Image (spheres, rainbow, N blue to C red):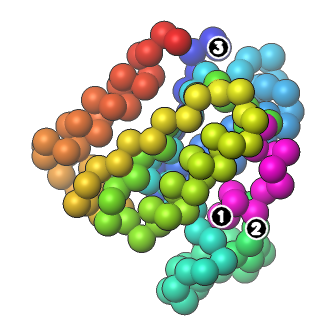
Amino acid sequence: MSRLFVAGDSAGGNIAHNLAMRAGRNKGLDDGGWIHGVALLDPYFLGRHVDPSSQRAWGFICAGRYGMDHPYVNPMALPAAAWRRLGSARVLMTVSDLDRLGPFQRAYVDALRVSGWPGQAQLYVTPGEGHCYFLNNLTSPKAAMHMAMLATFINRTT
């Protein structure tokens, strides 16, 4: 349990974030373990000021139960103190430079870094690519670099 990592791309990144937040609120996992690292790969985070198609998509995803300012989709809606309870020692955020979600992803890292959270936040930006490009062309050099960054993040001992 000392090497537990949670990772996800797009909506999976959103789920990984919310799992780490829940683990932090509960002071770790049920058996006393802690999430060592969270890898958020182009996560699906939105905010209040998004285009109507994103609002419709989020409404469909959550069956209309949560608005655009709910922390499930907009971590920036979290109070400052909540960031300090993120249940992980490290976070890797990957952002594809042409992804329209990039501003929300970058804001997440900035908020985490200034919150007083005691962990390490790392930002990795891939230039010239769109949302989750690494899933569509697994053999591209950029996708290989993305995978290498993830492997380095997981294998790092400190």
Q: Amino acid at mark 3?
A: Met
- Distance from disc 2 to disc 1, alpha carbons, whole Å, reads 6 Å
Rendered-image quadrant of the N terminus: top right
Q: Position of residue 158 (x, y in %)?
A: 52, 12
User: Looking at the image, is mark 3 or mark 2 earlier in the sequence?
Assistant: 3
154 left or right of 86 in image: left
| Residue 158 position (above or below residue 28) | above
64 left or right of 121 in image: right
Cβ–Cβ under 8 Å for marks 2 and 1: yes
User: Under tag 3, what secondary structure?
Assistant: loop
| Residue 55 position (above or below residue 81) | below
Which numbered disc, 3 or 2, marks the residue closer to the eye?
A: 2
Cβ–Cβ under 8 Å for marks 3 and 2: no
Q: What residue is drawn where x is 65% and y is 64%? A: 73
Q: Position of residue 148 (x, y in %)?
A: 28, 29
Q: Residue furthest bottom?
A: 52
Residue labelled with disc 2: 70
| Residue 50 position (above or below residue 22) | below
Quadrant of the image occupied by residue 60: bottom right
User: Of residues 107 and 92, which is closer to you in this image?
Assistant: 107
| Residue 53 is covered by the magenta coloring | no
Q: Which residues lie in the magenta part?
A: 72-84
Q: Amino acid at mark 2?
A: His
User: Looking at the image, is mark 3 or mark 1 earlier in the sequence?
Assistant: 3
Marker disc for residue 1: 3
Q: What residue is drawn where x is 49% and y is 36%? A: 122
Is residue 154 in view? yes
Which numbered disc, 3 or 1, marks the residue closer to the eye?
A: 1
| Residue 128 position (above or below residue 121) | below
46 left or right of 136 in image: right
- Distance from disc 3 to disc 1, alpha carbons, whole Å, reads 28 Å
Marker disc for residue 73: 1
